[in-house]
Image (cartoon, rainbow, N blue to C red):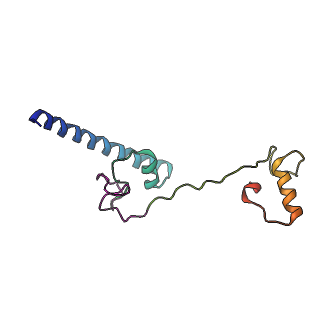
Amino acid sequence: MGIPEKVTLLIESEVEKQTHERLCAMVEKVSKLYSVPLKIARRDLLGDGYCMGVKRSGKLCTNKIVKDGYCLHHVNDSRPHKPIVIKDTVRHNHVYPSPLQEGCPACALLTKNRDNNEFRDLSTIM
């Protein structure tokens, strides 16, 4: 590898580093504006390749990934939780809350469960 290739690699790595720092500043701004936790905003807005940790100063870490998306300094940090997904298969086909209506699959499920004296699933209530 000659000198021109080394200079090209050096320039590309510096451009990548500065671009990542600007993106981190944007993520921090979005986190403050919309009251989203910084780690979750970082996970959702920035790509892979850089640490997902947060420095003590409150800024995003700019180190490269070593293990599981974190650098050596943040490898033992707490991880952001994944969103809770509620599998909603039965829904009301009318304005809810209202009296139970015939032809509504969710109302039919409620009346069936009421007759059987069983517990209701949370998705049938909402």
- Left/right placement of residue 82 relative to residue 68 reads right
Image location (x, y in percent) of residue 116: 87, 64
Q: Main secondary structure of the magenta part?
A: loop
**Region in magenta:** 55-78
* Foreground of the two, 23 or 29: 23
User: In the figure, residue 26 lies in which quadrant?
Assistant: top left
Figure quadrant of the N terminus = top left
Image location (x, y in percent) of residue 120: 78, 62
Residue at image location 46% in from the left, 53% down from the top = 40
Farthest residue, direction front: 1
Farthest residue, direction left: 3
- Left/right placement of residue 83 relative to residue 39 reads right
- 72 drawn magenta: yes
Image location (x, y in percent) of residue 21: 31, 45
Residue at image location 90% in from the left, 47% down from the top = 102
User: In the figure, residue 112 lies in which quadrant?
Assistant: bottom right
- 105 drawn magenta: no
User: In the figure, residue 18 lies in which quadrant?
Assistant: top left
Figure quadrant of the C terminus = bottom right
* Foreground of the two, 112 or 100: 112
- Left/right placement of residue 71 relative to residue 89 reads left
Task: Tell me: residue 76, above or below residue 25.
Answer: below
Badge count:
0
- Left/right placement of residue 88 relative to residue 75 reads right
Residue at image location 75% in from the left, 60% down from the top = 121
Image location (x, y in percent) of residue 58: 36, 58
